[in-house]
Image (tube, rainbow, N blue to C red):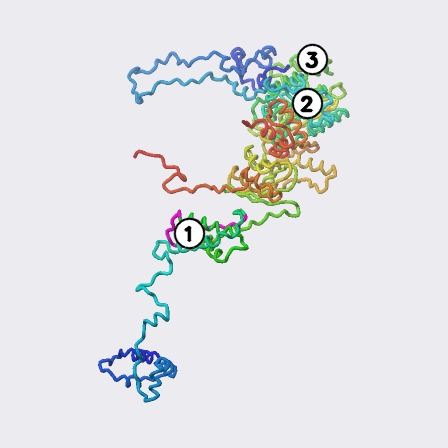
Amino acid sequence: MSTPNCLRCLVRPSAGIPVSGPMSRTATTATPIAALPLTRTLTAPFSTTAASNAAPRRAFQPAASTKGHSRVGKKLQLGKFKKDRVAERGRVPQPGERKAYRKRITLSNDNAIPVPWLTDLAPADMTAAENTARVLALPEEVQDQLRAGEAFKTTQCWGMFRKPAVLVRKETVNLANQMQESADNRKTLRLVVTGDKVAGKSMMLLQAMAHAHLNNWIVINLPEAHEITTASTEYAPIPNTDPVQYMQPVYVLKLIHAIKRANEQVLSKTYTIQAHPELPQNIPSNTPLLALANVAKEADGAWPVFQALWNELTAQKANRPPILLCLDGLAHAMKVSDYRSPSFERIHSHDLALVRLFTDALGGGVQFPAGGAVLAATSRNNAPRAPSMELALAQREAEARRGAGAAGVEVPQKDPFFRGYDDRVEAVLRSVRVLRVAGVDKLEARALMEYWAASGMLRATVDEKTVTEKWTLAGSGVLGEMERAALLTMRI
Amino acid sequence: MASSSRQGLTSALRGVSTRPNGGQRQPLEQQFQSLQLTPAIVHRRCMASQYNGRRDNRNNDITAAPEFDFGSFARKFALANYARPVPVSPSYFSRTPSFNDRYLTLEKLFRAYSNLPLIPAADAERIAWKTLADLRQSFGEPVKATDYVKCLTIVKRLHQIHPELKPDAVKSALQDFKRDVQAFLNVTNPIPIDKFGRALGVGKRKSSIARAFVVEGDGQVLVNGKTLPDYFGRVHDRESAVWALHSTDRIDKYNVWARVEGGGTTGQAEALTLAIAKALLAHEPALKPALRRAGCVTRDPRRVERKKHGRVKARKGFTWVKR
């Protein structure tokens, strides 16, 4: 069973934000939040239903030093009915509580009807073409793993259904097969998922992660690139690097914990091949990687631990499972970040060590010992302009189409009069594959709408007419728009 | 000269002199001889007094013609019995003579031709009859509304007479009651379906103009090169745009490629409704009643009301200030 509330809400990139609820009284900001025992976090420190009951309501009491008005009883009363009204404000939310509420992820709805024919995903389900246009549920352990890896987004409609389920689309089968093929050949698939707004790009990453978890891969997910590059988490230069690189210890600590929780099973069966005496806690060789990950207790030592973990994972000739490395919101990783160097110049995102690690892998600089995949997804609603990235993706797409034998495809070229191109970005994206996610076809739309109707969330007969109507309103089956048109619009 | 001589002759016949030298009366013979008679006048005069002429032949003596006998004259020619002339129209003294005349004509025709076979009113040619205001304007008379209604009832009844048997009198009588501009004669140009199978419909709403090309397809819509959700943020607007297809269950049968300009999102969406409906009618004219019920046929003529002076907007008043 998944935890009743999201771990994301409890482990935040910035330790400066105290955790909501009664815990914030005891745990000061100096205490590493994630170091708290897991049992402690399970005691529902934050409840949405009875928020007002969670803390005893206290009326506003003025400080004792103020003695009220200096001329009590002699006030000039202008209005006949004007009385001293005390505004009833209710309980003021704790710091961070509103954000936790906003970012909370609900994965089940007890009021939704359980769908009888819904089956759980099996390891080979996503690679099978006959599963196209079927809705399959995520097994519970995978739910936990995905949740730990922050694969679920607040914008997705998980909270409407009894249990999380995904639609297997043609693109899903395509992606899963590419991943499987690369893992079988001990190659690294490097692929960028792109497409229109709310077309299901993040969902493709989630499905890839689910596939990886089901097949015992190691999954490292960077859920939002903007968390890394918009100067919202602490950073520090890494000594002895030239050109200087920057680490983000707090974020990395959070990431290590996410990796640890998401891949607990696999990491405990994977062993180090070399000793790591430089870490705060000595790690001899042949230790489970889980123990190595557990070394990171504080933000201070997080980056060396992460580096050691990464080196172990990518150590050649070692017995390693395939690795999946994911990042969502690629445009943020492909621009000059908002961080400043000591000389107050803006740091390029690729000079942030974590981003560089990802871009090296995406650019083909890292070979995973047992193969794997490096996936990135673009975003359409929180994306800065990254002209080089857009151009490179368009070029790769056109090249792929030309390679497939399409006639008359022109590969777009650089605008010679535009200065905003970025060579480092182009180098990274020179040889990636591009998977374009567009609208679903009517068969897939119908499968999805039948699942909605079976869950009691779509109160309409699912027939050709309804399916085509929603499919058209959603601009030829853009999934997010179908949700908007069918699920999220109140109809009485 | 001729006129003066004729005048002289007339006065001579009457025995009255109107000459300026009338103080000295000349003998009738002198007067007569002073005239230069044209042969025609002489001949006429001979005819008028044949008896005398015969006598003239005898002794060449001139006498005046005998008096006219008005009694026999009246018997010979129909002359009025009254002192003042009676008007031809019976409604000459009414306030609305021209209307009344026509009304009476119609009644008379109605009595005369009430036995002719009729055709159903729906089969008769559609005619835009003059409204009361038009009628008043064209006749220049204050026609009463009740009279107008009665008159128009007869007009419509006469109009129903079978066209092959309709007398010309009826046709001409009805002519005055037709409007000058016959809107029913306007024939809408049918929207063609071009060689690519496209029908172009144009729709307007508020300040928006939409042109929609509708082809047979599977339900794809492009508005100004964008998909429906890209172009219209509101789901309601998207539904409005394809409402013509949706309400007739044709949403999976056609593709739409549209250009919209002007106005806001609502106006553009509803202009699209109209444009798509018109183009759809080109493909399937039988859908017109269904589309009319769905409200996709009639153009909504409302526009922004103009701002008035003395007001903040069209109607909003200024804030009341005490002083």
Q: Picture coordinates of residue B220 (x, y %)?
A: 63, 37
Amino acid residing under circle 2: Leu
Q: Picture coordinates of residue A94 (x, y %)?
A: 50, 16
Q: Residue furthest left?
A: B23
Q: Nearer the viewer, residue A256 or A6?
A: A6
* Quarter of the figure with residue A376: top right
Instruction: Give the number of the disc on residue A280.
Output: none
Q: Chain of mark 1?
A: B
Query: Marks 3 and 1, how far apart in space?
Result: 108 Å
- The residue under label 2 is A136
Magenta residues span B123-146
* Quarter of the figure with residue A189: top right
Secondary structure state at the residue bearing disc 2: strand
Amino acid residing under circle 1: Leu
Is A181 on the left or on the right of B319, as rendered? Answer: right
- The residue under label 1 is B135
Q: Is residue B65 visible?
A: yes
- The residue under label 3 is A283
Q: Picture coordinates of residue B28 (x, y %)?
A: 27, 83
